[in-house]
Amino acid sequence: MTASYHQIPLAQVQPGMVLSDELLDVQGNVLLPQGTVLTDAMLALMPRHGIAILPIASTDEVSADEVQATLQHHDQRLAHLFRKNDPDSDSDWATALLRQFVSDFRLGVAEEESPE
Amino acid sequence: MSTILTYDDVVKNLDDLPSLPAVVMELLNSIDQEDVDISVLAKKVSHDQALTAKTLRLANSSLYGLQVKVTTIQQAITYLGFQTTRNLITAAAVTGCFAEGQCPGFDHKAFWRHSIATAACAKVLARQMRFNQDYAFTAGLLHDIGRLVLVSCFPQQYAEAIAHRAAHDCFMLDAERTVLGVDHVDAGLALAEHWNFSDTMRLAIGGHHDPEAPGAGFLAAIIHVADAIVHALDLTQVEDDLVPPVSTVAWTALGLDKAVYLQLFRETELQYEEIQMVLLS
């Protein structure tokens, strides 16, 4: 499901980066599933499994236009899906909240930036 | 206009529905029983090759993170437990049981995509809430099963309801009530009765659009929210999909914060991909 990724040498991989693919060891056994958020502990174990390069999901380095287009597409789609919801309605706040969460999820708004 | 149907009309037609394999009925009926003879059941399921194959593929998916590949139903029970295996068998059986293409405009594949996504999401939610994940998975999978009942028993009328929905851009639930006179919740309950579902499952099917009703139960709230999340995540990929209103009572009952939801969205998407590849291939 990850659109683009980079093969990054172990030394440059930071905790918090996300695996774009499942990670296999030399025997072909799955060590970590796709989408794993890497931690210090996991990275420390990599040399033992003979892993020098990891497939990391790219978060940036896509052209700004593409990003803009994707964001706009998601935004329009969400507006369409939630077309029966009035975001300012007092009684329907749970739906509005769900919309806000999914929107942040899709548009990649960092959690720290949330208005609450 | 077509004639308005009643709950009794639905019940009368239930006998014409395809029946599940006998062993699956037996499994469903034993959902609350503790003293079932597992080895006998495992043997019975093993006689159905297609069912066994699908079940084992589910068991071996990364969903359960097994270190070994299970190759028999008995083994699956050993590693995953009886409850989980039973749910996998049910999922594998139910998704293949209704005939496709009798009702113009009804997208069978989309129906199951939605059901599987809801099952995946409900399972993740249940884990967060420390609720029985297997109940949540099965209830999520079956919550809209009444739609299939209506489609199978009254294809003509249901096609009208679909056209009505498209013309008025309303919720399918309202279109069903207007055109048919019964909705998929009624039909689901009738089937749950007919197939002897457990009370937990019945309440969840009956309450997933109205979790605020007295006695609806916690599982109904989980399924209700999972259903809305799946619509919002657009996992079904239906052009005119609509997110149903989320009950504030159910939302509050779950009491999860934003960080949990974001994590949950991601997990749901990943699990959904995997399950739907097994069940819909």
Image (cartoon, coloured by chain):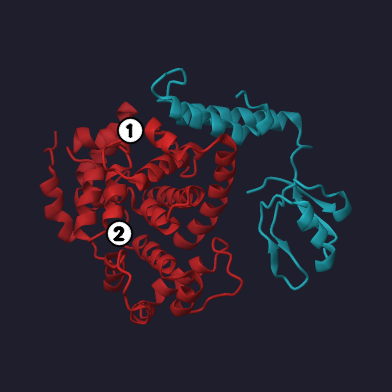
Q: Colour of chain B?
A: red
Front residue (pair B174, B281):
B174
Query: Residue A20's spot in the image, x, y percent?
Result: 71, 51
Residue tagged 2: B99
Residue tagged 1: B171
Number of labels in the image equals 2
Query: Looking at the rendered structure, which numbered label has been put on residue B115?
Result: none
Query: Residue B177's spot in the image, x, y percent?
Result: 21, 35
Badge 2 density bin: few <14, some 14–19, many ≥20, Cα 10 Å? few
Q: Nearer the viewer, mark 2 or mark 1?
A: 1
Q: What is the distance, in whole Å, between disc 2 and disc 1 at their CAs? A: 25 Å
Front residue (pair B57, B248):
B248
Q: Quadrant of residue B168?
A: top left
Tell me the chain of label 1.
Answer: B
Q: Secondary structure at mark 1?
A: loop
**Could you tell me the amino acid type at mark 2?**
Ala
Task: Confirm or deny contact between disc 2 and disc 1 (CB under 8 A).
Answer: no
Q: Earlier in the sequence, mark 2 or mark 1?
A: 2
Q: Which chain is cyan?
A: A
Query: Residue A47's spot in the image, x, y percent?
Result: 85, 64
Tell me the chain of label 2.
Answer: B
